[in-house]
């Protein structure tokens, strides 16, 4: 009987611990001003669904795209469309080889992951 109570209590303890954990807060949306006047210093594709963007002050941001931007991993250049304002944010669009890739989230980032170097 004691074993049965312990087996029934274990899932409740686990579930209770999950409920008391603090919720994960999403990162605040960010922006890069003066995008058309040297605002972007560097960029790096993160597959076809995201883009790391570095501003002129060397701060990194991550742009999550609405869908797949198929040419992004192979692009040598990208454009940014801001629709009249000179600020890149979550309402902007990335242009890759004529394909428009809308941004749905634009947040500060630590930058792209560092690739492991080859030994030898």
Image: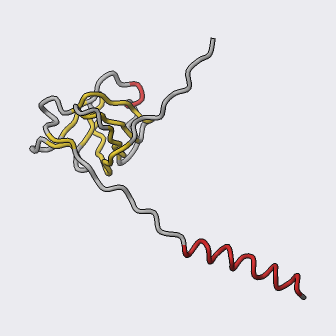
Of residues 6 and 79, the one drawn nearer to the viewer in this rendering: 6
Q: In this view, does 19 lie to the left or right of 109?
A: right
Q: Residue at x 59, y 71 (%)?
A: 18
Residue 56: name its quadrant: top left
Q: Position of residue 52 (x, y in %)?
A: 36, 36
Q: Position of residue 97 (x, y in %)?
A: 29, 27
Q: Where is residue 108 in the image (x, y as percent from the top left)?
A: 33, 46
Of residues 17 and 38, the one drawn nearer to the viewer in this rendering: 17
Q: Which residue in the rendered view is the most extreme toward the bottom? A: 1
Q: Quadrant of the N terminus?
A: bottom right
Q: In this view, does 83 lie to the left or right of 4?
A: left
Q: In this view, does 102 lie to the left or right of 20?
A: left
Q: Residue at x 39, y 32 (%)?
A: 45
Q: Which residue in the rendered view is the most extreme toward the top? A: 120
Eyeballing the image, is 22 above or below 39? Answer: below
Q: Residue at x 33, y 43 (%)?
A: 63
Q: Residue at x 33, y 21 (%)?
A: 76
Eyeballing the image, is 64 above or below 5? Answer: above
């Amino acid at each position: 009987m004691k074993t049965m109570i312990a087996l029934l209590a274990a899932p409740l303890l686990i579930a209770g611990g999950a409920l008391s954990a603090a919720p994960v807060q999403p990162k605040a949306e960010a922006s890069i001003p003066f995008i058309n006047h040297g605002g972007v210093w560097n960029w790096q594709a993160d597959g076809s669904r995201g883009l790391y963007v570095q501003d002129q002050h060397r701060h990194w941001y991550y742009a999550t795209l609405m869908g797949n931007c198929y040419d992004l991993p192979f692009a040598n250049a990208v454009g940014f469309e801001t629709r009249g304002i000179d600020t890149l944010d979550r309402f902007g669009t990335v242009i890759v080889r004529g394909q428009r890739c809308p941004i749905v989230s634009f947040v500060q980032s630590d930058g792209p992951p560092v690739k492991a170097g080859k030994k030898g």
